[in-house]
Image (cartoon, grey):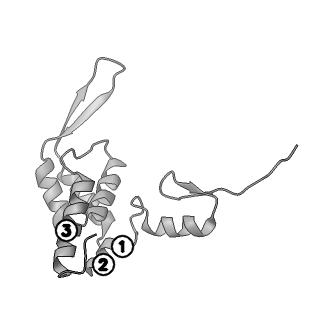
Amino acid sequence: MRVETKKIYYCEYCKKKSMRKDIMKKHEKICTENVNRECGICKLLKNDRSDIKSISEIALTMIKHKETSRECGGVIDITILNEAEVLDYIREKTNSCPNCILSVIKQIRKNIDVWFPSFKYKNEFEAMMQDINADRNGYGEY
């Protein structure tokens, strides 16, 4: 019989794990649940770093919501009544960076269990990359 003991490294912010310390250190720097994260997209666009913590705190105070309880199990659904207004504020403060928007939404979700159904990360990321590629003047597609 063979027994091995291995170290597993866990992200301080999310549930990600790795058996390589260097990989986990890199992940923690860019983890979207880390309020002090380094954003690769903002670096690419030469944007100032977004203050995720203060943006999410202000956005949280802006949210107007409605709670609806379900009959089965007492689960409560929370619906944002002013989603467009809150998302516009977040987009403005994060320079429309999809990674930073996602990070702010994740911080809000730590306080109130809501999601923003109109925010589609994939669509926002692809639109941003199309804008970046259009500015490159023929350097190729992403």
Q: Give the secondary structure at mark 1.
A: helix
Q: Give the secondary structure at mark 3.
A: helix
**Residue 44 numbered mark, or none:** 2
Tell me: 124 left or right of 52. Answer: left
Total numbered labels placed on residues in the image: 3
Tell me: 115 left or right of 32. Answer: left
- How crowded pointer 3 is (Cα within 10 Å; few <14, some 14-19, many 20+) is rated as some
Identify the image quadrant of the N terminus.
top right
- Mark 3 near mark 2, Cβ–Cβ under 8 Å? no
* 3 or 2: tag closer to the N-terminus: 2
**Residue 103 percent location from the top left of the image:** 33, 59
Q: Which residue shows up at 16% across the image and 67% down it?
A: 92
**Residue 130 numbered mark, or none:** 3
Q: What residue did someone put label 1 on?
A: 40
Q: Which residue shows up at 29% across the image and 17% down it?
A: 71
Instruction: Say above or below: 84 vs 91.
Output: above
Amino acid found under the numbered disc labelled 3: Gln
Q: Which residue shows up at 28% across the image and 22% down it?
A: 70
Toward which corner of the image does residue 64 lie, by quadrant?
A: top left
**Residue 5 percent location from the top left of the image:** 78, 53
Q: Which residue shows up at 56% across the image and 64% down it?
A: 24
Instruction: Say above or below: 69 vs 28.
Output: above
- Mark 1 near mark 2, Cβ–Cβ under 8 Å? yes
86 or 26: nearer the viewer:
26
16 or 139: nearer the viewer:
139
**Residue 96 percent location from the top left of the image:** 20, 66
